[in-house]
Amino acid sequence: MQFVPQPPHKLARNSAVFALQKWVLPIAATALSIGIFIAVPRFTAPYVIVLMTSILMYVVLSVSWTVFCAPSQYFSLGIAAFFGVGIYTYAILAHALPSAPLPLLLIVAGISSSILAFFVGLTTLRIKGMYFAIFTFGLSELLRHFVMWWEVNMTGTVGRWIAIVEDVIVYRYMAILAVVTVLIAYLLRRSRYGLALRSIGDGESASEHVGVNVSAVKIAVFTGSCFFTGAAGALIATRWTYIDADFAFDPIRNMFTIMMSLFGGMDILIGPILGAVSIGTISDVVLTRLPQFSRLLLGLLLVVVVIFIPQGLAGVFSSSVWRSLRARLKKEDLGKGFHGRGGRE
Amino acid sequence: MLVRLLDVLIAGLVMGGIYALAAMGLNLQYGVVRVLNMAHGDFIMLGGFAAFWLFTLLGINPLLALVVSTPIMFAIGLLVHRLVYHPLRVKSKSISAFEGYSILASYGLIFILQNLVIVSWGGRLKAYSYLASPVNIFGAIFAANRLVALLLTAVISIGFYLFLSRTRTGKAIRAIAQDTEVAHLMGINVDRLYGLTFGLGAVLAGMAGVILSTMFPVSATMGFSYTLIAVVVIVLGGLGNILGGLVGGLVLGIVGAVVTDLQPGLVMVAFYVMFLVILLLKPTGIFGKQGS
Amino acid sequence: MADTVKIVEGDHVTRMFGGLAAVSDVSFSLFEGEILGLIGPNGAGKTTLFNLISGAASATRGAILFKGSEITRMSVARRCHLGIARTFQTGKLFPSMTVNENVLVAALFGKGDGKTDAHARQETLELLDFVGLSDKANQPAKGLTLAAQRRLEIARALATHPAVLLLDEVLAGLTPTEVAQGVDLIGRIRSRGISILIVEHIMKAVMGLSDRIVVLHHGEKIAEGSPAEIASSRTVQDVYLGETL
């Protein structure tokens, strides 16, 4: 196949537009969003800040889960494990290095989650099939047992004490983390590796056959995504004075994350964000009004969503309303489209 | 020393038998229906609770409970399949999509079942005593119920294996596991057998639960660990491979007994290490996946 | 075609499946620039042989060679980078992606050489044009007609710059007009210097396209030769039981 290069001036203009669309706009949007989030506390009550911090944390969880699991169709059932590793890393480091700056601790916590993710990926993502799902299934429980055993037998202490960080500060960092997570997810989706990941989910065998190093792509994206999960765990840990293995590795977070992502919609970036915001606010209500039925209701919701609306809210919305809206906005393209469809085949 | 060894060995066989039975249902379901029901351990839990209530309220002994629980568990299995997995199968565009989504749905099922039990019967441990009198075997002392358990699991496992290999229904089930298309062509009512097989898997889980309840207390949250064990067993033996599951169960039982003897808090870690090792060395399991 | 360079070779290749041999002691050569037809009744082992060449299945015994070097244990992706591409009998397009994206991912990763995005996009457009799918570029791969799906699979395979293209029943289920268009396309692919191994049941097409033919039955090679030789071979006729060649 002959590659005919385009004339230089056209290439240059195209790449300028391309770069603008690809890098500049997203980063500008990110900076703007962060700015807005950081300014919010001036105008709202303290409890709203606390609620928003939780919701932003859910956004990080669901986006970081979705960014790998949705396109690849490899469902991780153990996000709580990576979240918990973040919590514990922070607790240990903050205690050992009390004067270390918060951002550094968050980054190290994120990295430690990534390291676990790397080993999990190395073991299970090089094999096709359900192995990844079932290995991650018990991972949070495994870590819970192991950390408890370690604390009882090795360190003699159970749980850890953490110095509290101010609510507003936690909120601001969580906002930054959430926005950055969304940015990375967005950039990945639009990059060649995002495309490769989608091809893996659509047909791993065919993906290999067109030259994609499926194992490397899977492991890389999974490892990267868990960085944000771990950092979120580390950050939210600052809210509590005391954490232990039961809290850090609570398996309810697995279900929560999966449900938020599915409910919101896995196929579009806005989906998990939508899911995090809606479920985040609903769960607050459910947990306070009907605590004894909370798991039942959430589990039921998950099952119902999986069976009846697997494309999630965003998926339902995008298919019907969006399509007609987009069609109306792109009136010129409609003509071309019809020509093509009528066509030769 | 010898007594300790015997202790561990028999404990290993007893638990191994339980693990093998616990895994058998899951193996059957995955091999035929292609569902990895993560709530399998909760079916085991339900069996355990059934035995507990039958014993505590009606004085029905666990051996009888095995029989009584069978139709109950079968009905539950059938219901779950019809409500959850059947609709998913119909809507899924491919087998791998179905496998993926059904595992997600099953995760939700765990919390539904656990919460239902907690709301109905509380979250505390429930236990009853059955054949707890000690038996002496060459110096190693065991409660009689342990040995009864071993006998029961052996009988049920072998019995079910024979069902699969000798009876018409069993062979039809195996045919679906081998090649669904061909099974259809042979006139086998595949859809009906999906439900039947799933129900049978639930029955086996329930039986494991009943037997477990004679030796250990039951609780609403015990399911998770048993699902995990069942999962490791079937990966060890080869997904869908019934014989492999039996061997895998025994292996895990013995490993579990050894680790319990040395460092009880690390049993789950030991199982996960085995999980890791088999995934690194031979992911298709000792006996290999069926059909590959 | 006096080329004697063997692009792909199978050396006594065997692939066991449980107790049965899906492919049994098959040796063959694909010469550079030729079109080799692979025929045989259903279940003869043709797709298995393709799997062995592309790396989707591993040989129990024997070796697969590419340009003289052994690739028997090489991964699928690496074989693709070397220059082996294929289509699938069951049609494995990427359903959630557009026509353009299906080819683009192959253009980006097919050679493992870190091509730029712009370069890959350009190649994709050219390939879609080559197979006649330019007007459908932004349609989802899901809704395509059968013939369009086949073209897309071919375009995707070609995007990896193959030296060898394995076509697995790419004309099956098409109307006579579409078959003719397909045959034309295959001819144009050969003109680009790509060697082709084609599995097909449409005898007229295979006989017309192929320089040589290999016949498989129950996993074994039972005949090999020019289309004329195969058409008149008693052995082959017996196997096909009366089907007009």
Image (cartoon, coloured by chain):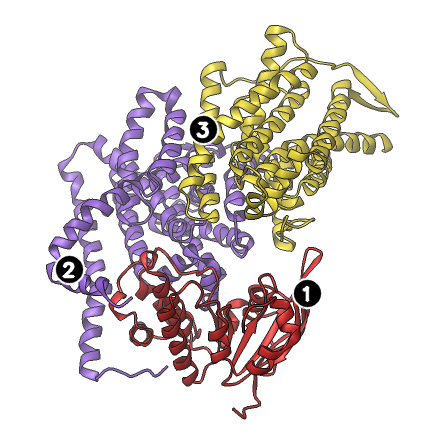
Chain colours: A purple, B yellow, C red
Residue at the far bottom: name it.
C2
Count of numbered badges drawn on the protein: 3
Labels 2 and 3 within one chain: no
Give the spatial CA distance, label 1 vs label 3. 46 Å
Q: Is residue B152 above or below residue A66?
A: above
The image's mark for residue B111 is 3
- Secondary structure at badge 1 equals loop
Question: Disc 1 sits on a residue from what chain?
Answer: C
Secondary structure beneath dot 3 equals: helix
Tag 2 subunit: A
* Amino acid type of the residue tagged 1 in the rendering: Thr
From the viewer's perspective, is residue B129 above or below residue C84? above
Query: Residue at 56% of width from left, 45% of height from top?
Result: B185
Quadrant, the N terminus of chain A: bottom left
Indicate which disc residue C60 carries.
1
Residue that numbered label 2 is attached to: A334
Give the vertical position of A4 relative to A42 (above or below): below
Relative image position of residue B93 (x, y in whole percent): 41, 47
Query: Amino acid under label 3?
Result: Phe
